[in-house]
Amino acid sequence: MENFFDQQTYQIETGLQIIQQIVFFEMKSKDFIRCHLRLENTYLTLFEDCKEPKVLNTINIANSYLEFPIHVCMGRGVIIKQSIKQLQIFGLSSKILQILKLYGIQKDFVTQYKVIKQIGRGGFGKVYKVKNVQNKNLYAVKMFEKQLLLDSKARQAIIKEVQILRLMNHPNVLSMIECFESEQCIFLVEELLDYHLQIDAGCRLKEEQAILILIKLLNGLEYIHSKNILHRDIKPNNILLKYNGDPVISDFGLSDFYRSDGNYLFQKCGTNGYYAPEMITTQNYNFKCFGNYQLVMFLICLNFAICQMIVFNQ
């Protein structure tokens, strides 16, 4: 099966600070030269290390394919492949490697992670609890089968979800660690949250706790809006909890970037009972009315249940 992310580069303001470093770049002659690296947003540029530096090469790392070879002399490096362009670099800092793993695509998921159990299911994929075989940390991985993504809108939705998740960096918003692709599947490795929030006739939640949860959710929603993103499916099932009880907004499968013309990938989407009125009446809408209305509905659910909730351990 063809590569899912082929030709899917994009230009976007990531908010990342410009990072510069001295690295070693492999030339076509197989010689290594010392050069300056500059990473700005998703563009990586290599400059010749001299008094009047000139550009040696540049590449957009967004959805580039990554390999991590080990050279007998240079140690561990990275090969970045984007379309017909390929760069091999050694001596990268851990910070740049982390950014590359976030914005790039790797191929060796089965050698890096061990699946423990299934913990969820969505419209296009399943969610598993996994362990990284190197650092032994636990993560959640959202797995999509390519054979179920033949529809062009389904493919676009996954690509957009990955693009949006890469921008998320907030304690009350779900974040992605890295992305993998195999012949059959797409794997999104995300932070593992300890509990799943559900409104139910279980243990009573104090008013002060409910207020604190809503304040943190509003902070997370404000952050999402600051990135010009509409979540479009905020509901109790998409609110996860950390071990300390902090809420996290998850599941960006229906999210999109705000457009003034209202021409979104999915015009009508969400969950019954949580639609914004503007969507039901087919009016043009923006991120403000959408997120705020859904959180108001979430608050009503808390009050209706007399602030009762039950949490389920994953």
Image: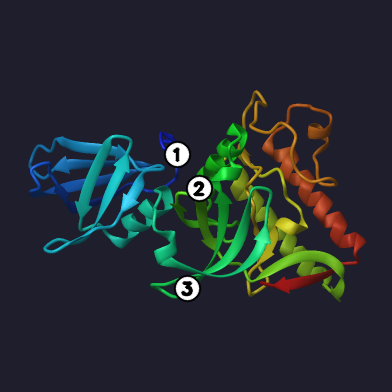
The C terminus sits in image quarter: bottom right
Can residue 288 be seen here? The reply is yes
How many numbered marks, from 0 up?
A: 3
**Residue depicted at 25% across the width and 41% down the height:** 86
Badge 3 is on which residue?
A: 137
Instruction: Determine whether the residue tagged by mark 3 lies in a helix, strand or loop.
Output: loop
Q: Quadrant of residue 170?
A: bottom right
Q: Nearer the viewer, residue 54 or 71?
A: 71
Rendered view: 102 above or below 256:
below
Q: Residues within 10 Å of mark 3 (few under 14, many from 20)?
A: few
Q: CA distance from mark 3 to mark 2?
A: 22 Å
Q: How is the image coloured?
A: rainbow
Amino acid bearing label 1:
Glu
**Residue depicted at 18% across the width and 35% down the height:** 55
**Residue depicted at 68% across the width and 38% down the height:** 287
Q: Reading the chain from its start, which is encountered first: label 1 or label 2?
A: 1
Badge 2 is on which residue?
A: 167
Q: Nearer the viewer, residue 124 or 278?
A: 124
Q: CA distance from mark 1 to mark 2?
A: 9 Å
Q: Position of residue 145 (x, y in %)?
A: 56, 49
Q: Residues within 10 Å of mark 1 (few under 14, many from 20)?
A: few
Nearer the observer, disc 3 or disc 2? 3
Can residue 172 be seen here? The reply is no
Instruction: Determine whether the residue tagged by mark 1 lies in a helix, strand or loop.
Output: loop
Q: What mark, if any, has residue 13 been given in the picture?
A: 1
Amino acid bearing label 3:
Asn
Q: What mark, if any, has residue 141 been given in the picture?
A: none
Q: Reading the chain from its start, which is encountered first: label 3 or label 2?
A: 3
